[in-house]
């Protein structure tokens, strides 16, 4: 996502968590699988879901 869109989302979506996971193309889960899994796990931990 372009930085401007990230700022717009952060400004307009209440409770949004933003995590930079490194460079990725159209299929981010194929490019950054470990980073995405870690971010999802950390988010679930913060929400007391796991």
Image: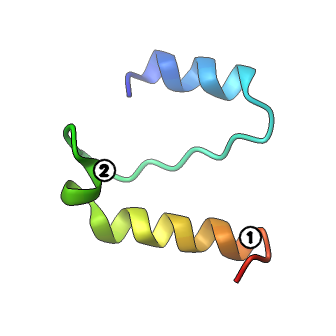
Q: Nearer the viewer, mark 2 or mark 1?
A: 1
Q: Which numbered disc covers residue 22? A: 2
Q: Where 44 falls versus 15 (above or below)? A: below
Q: Secondary structure at mark 1?
A: helix
Q: Where 10 falls versus 29 (above or below)? A: above
Q: Residue drawn at (32%, 71%), measured in percent from left and top?
A: 34
CB under 8 Å between discs 2 and 1: no
Location of residue 5 in the rendering, given as x and y in whole percent from the top left corner: 49, 19
Q: Where 7 falls versus 30 (above or below)? A: above
Label 1 belongs to which residue?
A: 46
Q: Residue drawn at (62%, 24%), measured in percent from left and top?
A: 9
Q: Residue drawn at (50%, 64%), measured in percent from left and top?
A: 39
Q: Where 50 falls versus 12 (above or below)? A: below
Q: Which numbered disc covers residue 30? A: none
Q: Residue drawn at (71%, 21%), measured in percent from left and top?
A: 11
Residue lying at the far bottom of the rendered structure: 50
Task: Say which quadrant the C terminus sits in.
Answer: bottom right
How crowded pointer 2 is (Cα within 10 Å; few <14, some 14-19, many 20+) is rated as few
How crowded pointer 1 is (Cα within 10 Å; few <14, some 14-19, many 20+) is rated as few
Location of residue 8 in the rendering, given as x and y in whole percent from the top left corner: 61, 17
Query: Would residue 25 appear left or right of 21 to someone viewing this image?
Result: left
Query: Would residue 19 appear left or right of 35 to someone viewing this image?
Result: right
> Picture quarter containing residue 31?
bottom left
Location of residue 14 in the rendering, given as x and y in whole percent from the top left corner: 80, 33
> Picture quarter containing residue 29?
bottom left
Q: Secondary structure at mark 2?
A: loop
Q: Nearer the viewer, residue 11 or 50?
A: 50
Task: Say which quadrant the N terminus sits in.
Answer: top left
Query: Would residue 40 appear left or right of 50 to someone viewing this image?
Result: left
Marks 2 and 1, the one that precedes in the sequence: 2
- Separation of disc 2 and disc 1 at Cα? 21 Å
Q: Nearer the viewer, residue 11 or 25?
A: 25
């Amino acid at each position: 996502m372009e930085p401007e869109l990230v700022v717009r989302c952060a400004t307009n979506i209440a409770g949004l968590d933003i995590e930079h996971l490194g460079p990725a193309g159209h299929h981010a889960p194929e490019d950054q699988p470990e980073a995405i899994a870690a971010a999802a796990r950390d988010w679930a931990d913060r929400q007391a879901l796991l």
